Image: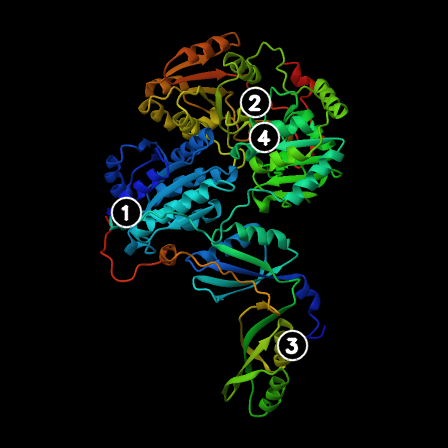
Amino acid sequence: MSAYTNGARIQSHHTVVAIVENKPGVLMRVASLFRRRGFNIESLTVGHSEEEGLSRLTLVVDGESAPVEQVEKQLYKLIDVVKVSDLSHEDMLARELAMIKVRCNNVNRHELLDIANVFRADVVDIATNSVILQVVGDESKIDGLTKMCEPYGIKEIARTGRVAMVRGAKTTTVHEAEPEKIARIHASQGRRVEGALPFSSD
Amino acid sequence: MARMTGAQMTLDSLQREGVDTIFGYPGGVVLPLYDTLPQFPGIRHVLCRHEQGAAHMADGYARASGRMGVCLGTSGPGATNLVTGICTSWMDSTPVFALTGNVARTLLGKDGFQEADITGITQPITKHNYLVMNAREIPLTIREAVHIATTGRPGPVLVDIPKDVFQETDEFDWPEQVRLRGYKPTVEGHAGMIKRAAELIDQAKRPIVIAGHGVIWADAHRELIEFAEKAGVPVITTFLGIGAFPESHPLSYGWLGMHGMYYANMAADGADVVIGIGMRFDDRAMGRFKDFNPTAKIVHIDIDPAEIGKNFPTAVPIVGSAKNVLPKLTEQVKQQPRKEWVRWIDQVREEHPSRDVRESRHMLPQYVMRTLYDETSGDATIVTGVGQHQMWAGQHYFYKRPRQLITSGGLGTMGFELPAAIGAQIAVPGQETWAICGDGSFQMTLQEMAVLVDEQLPIKMAIFNNGYLGMIRQWQQLFYDQNYSSCGISQPDFCKLADAYGIRAIRVETKAEVPLAIREARAHKGPILLDFQIDQEENVWPMVPAGAALSETIEAPEAELAR
């Protein structure tokens, strides 16, 4: 199997984007749901969205373990989940970032940098017997670079998991602002209080 | 805006939401709340003897009245004791509001005395839960929690409040509205899908309705009668759906499932269109999934989209409330008597009656239940525990109204009967309420008898006493080679125990005494316990063995009938 033909594995995976309230515990609710229903998560990425108070979660789900329709419906049942979109059948861009720390020396460094060049990976750190390559792309590209680096000795890999977006004007976002008063309370709901509190243990 | 403590805000908010009763138990961190309680005379506090009891009481209150039940426990063990009750509500989708205290904010996450991460613990068994970190969040949080518990598919919610938040003073700001971006239940039903369903039903030769708990919670039993009568569709219910359709109705064919009526199981298996309404095609109801009526087309009406297509492929999915969907469906279906299909089920029922009580000189549990039905003219509210007695209560009483049978179907929680009956009686005070107890099930929560005395509740407890964990014994007899392992259960003298609580009790030892004892219990003004010494080795029939299909329903073997 060449490094680039992991197609079958990728295809049985679904990319699901969930827009969720940025509240404490929301990640645990999502993770707990997947554990409870026996859905396997291939990767999970969270970050801020364009809307204040909402986070964007990108899940890659093993389609064998989970009918994607059930995944969507169960996610929707969580009160903190505002919108769920299955991007698998959309024309989407899917990207992942990886940092790969590879063993190398004066003799083979050039060769390794040539490979990095082919994959358009950046060299973000260099030392006498290692380099860190940073690469952005879909999973198969990262898998490909990883495979090419293996003969040199991979010391460490850090991958972000997939983020995805539909091409063109269509979006998977939510634009539903809350009244300010409610938004203010929602923003503090369940969060630790700033400043010192009186100590009470009775 | 008034300034209030967190405790005042909590009780004020609950009162604004129409709460009149809290089932609870005090503890260290909820002391500020208990300190404030006398300021709210409109809220009655019922002191349980174990928080599990409080959760079941709140559940029974909700199931009997349709209104949200509220239970309260302290942090740590108080909160964890609620868990079984919360999960019982979760599995059966009942609106219960669980309020817990927690350690002060400075101690959260430090493993302080009586700290438990109750929001973490209850996350998978609540519709939603909250940890409130500021007193000013309390009004909005309670409004949201009540809204979530009582709308859409109902369910339990939990609100956890640290002790110093109860004590904190802030402005009380009651929100005019609840706005949750991530929670908008669909109730109307898609017009196109309803049309497709009507067409499918019109073409069907052998349609059947399977009505569930959702019909009761949508308050749609009248709408169901109108639909069934117009479309001429026979109706069976799930176990929790008992009462969703009057069992005296000519189109009523009992309930299906593991111990359902033989003819109900056969009708479900023989139908060409199955119309599931407010039910979730659970394994106890449907038998082995892959062999349930493989040719039937399924129309599934449910308010929870995640239930549709979960266990079976659905021909016509309709997400919505039965209350909204059924009238539209009734309007569109053709009037059809479907005599041939009804006659077929009638004939199966004639040959396999399932609900007959056979003649015997023994005190059969079926006979006790049927006598109770006759003596109460079928009007009593029946609350059960879990086990054989639960199934006999479903089979040998005929239910005519929604909320008449209160039982833990999904989770199957033993010990549910007494506390749930207490909640039911408090919610609907004038209603004759019978707790049908197993001698094993009763022993799990019998401490709540103290509440009967405290609150002077005229609940009638009927213990179906066979000295066994009867359903365990039945399974060990049938499927484990009669290897009776830990199924015999010793017991206190229930009558003496009741007496010690100050509750009247009668031991009923012969068949002839059964009607007399029931009459005496009904005439007695206060609580009373009847200890029926029923036949020890009676089994529940019919039965779909675990893992079998509905078409493989077996009935009582000849040898057993001879006893």
Question: Which amino acid type corresponds to the residue marked 2 in the rendered image?
Answer: Trp
Looking at the image, residue A115 sits to the left or right of residue A125; the answer is right
Q: Do badges 1 and 4 share one subunit? A: yes
Instruction: Classify 10 Å Cα crowding around label 2: few (below 14), some (14-19), many (20 and above).
Output: many
Where is residue A54 shown, x and y percent of the image? Answer: 46, 61
Where is residue B47 shown, x and y percent of the image? Answer: 32, 31
Q: Which mark is residue B302?
A: none
Cα distance in 3D space between marks 3 and 2: 65 Å
* Quarter-of-image position of residue B297: top right
Dots 3 and 2: beta carbons under 8 Å?
no
Colour scheme: rainbow
Instruction: Classify 10 Å Cα crowding around label 4: few (below 14), some (14-19), many (20 and above).
Output: many
Question: Which amino acid type corresponds to the residue marked 3 in the rendered image?
Answer: Gly
> Under tag 3, what secondary structure?
helix
Q: Name the residue beneath numbered marker 3.
A: A144
Tell which subunit mark 3 falls on. A
> Under tag 4, what secondary structure?
helix
* Quarter-of-image position of residue B186: top right
Q: Which of marks 4 and 2 is nearer the N terminus?
A: 4
Dots 1 and 2: beta carbons under 8 Å?
no
Cα distance in 3D space between marks 4 and 2: 29 Å
> Under tag 1, what secondary structure?
helix
Dots 3 and 1: beta carbons under 8 Å?
no
Q: Name the residue beneath numbered marker 1.
A: B6
